[in-house]
Image: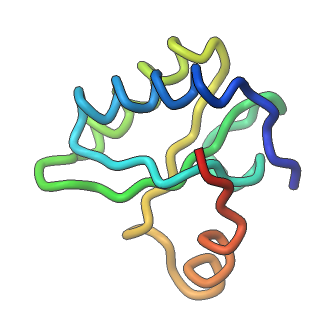
Amino acid sequence: MNKPVIDRSALRRHVSAVEEAYPLRILGLLPRGSAAHVFSPDAVDFLAEKREGLDLLGLSEAEVELSNRLGREVGIVLVSGLKGRQADELPKALSPL
């Protein structure tokens, strides 16, 4: 799995705007393919913590908004959704914003 190449300062601005609008905290970038529900080869995958009030619709809206801001598909993986081997391995593969 490859880590995406992206302008980090622009990325941080877009992530910050999405974090203000939705109850989640983006922890960093994951290798491409970590968000199994996103199929585009140039997508960007993030690991995030959910905050009080986040539901599936809000998570989907956050993905769409961040996708629109970045100009490519985005997948958000929640720490709370990780189980077993993924819970051990994905956080280790995290790349800081």
Q: Residue at x 72, y 31 (%)?
A: 43
Locate residue 33, reporting x and y percent: 76, 50
- Classify 85 as above or below 53: below
Locate residue 46, reporting x and y percent: 56, 47
Residue at the right extreme?
Answer: 2
Q: Is residue 72 left or right of residue 65?
A: right
Q: Is residue 7 left or right of residue 24?
A: right
- Classify 12 as above or below 95: above
- Classify 69 as above or below 89: above
Split into 4 quadrants, where in the image is the N terminus? bottom right
Q: Is residue 81 left or right of residue 74?
A: left
Counting every numbered tag in the picture gives 0
Split into 4 quadrants, where in the image is the C terminus? top right
Locate residue 50, reporting x and y percent: 29, 55
- Front one among 8 and 24: 8
- Front one among 69 and 36: 69
Q: Residue at x 13, y 55 (%)?
A: 52
Locate residue 87, reporting x and y percent: 55, 79
Question: Quadrant of residue 64 in the image?
Answer: top left
Q: Is residue 39 left or right of residue 12?
A: right
Q: Residue at x 37, y 69 (%)?
A: 80
Question: Quadrant of residue 6 in the image?
Answer: top right
Question: Quadrant of residue 63 in the image?
Answer: top left
Residue at the front extreme?
Answer: 9
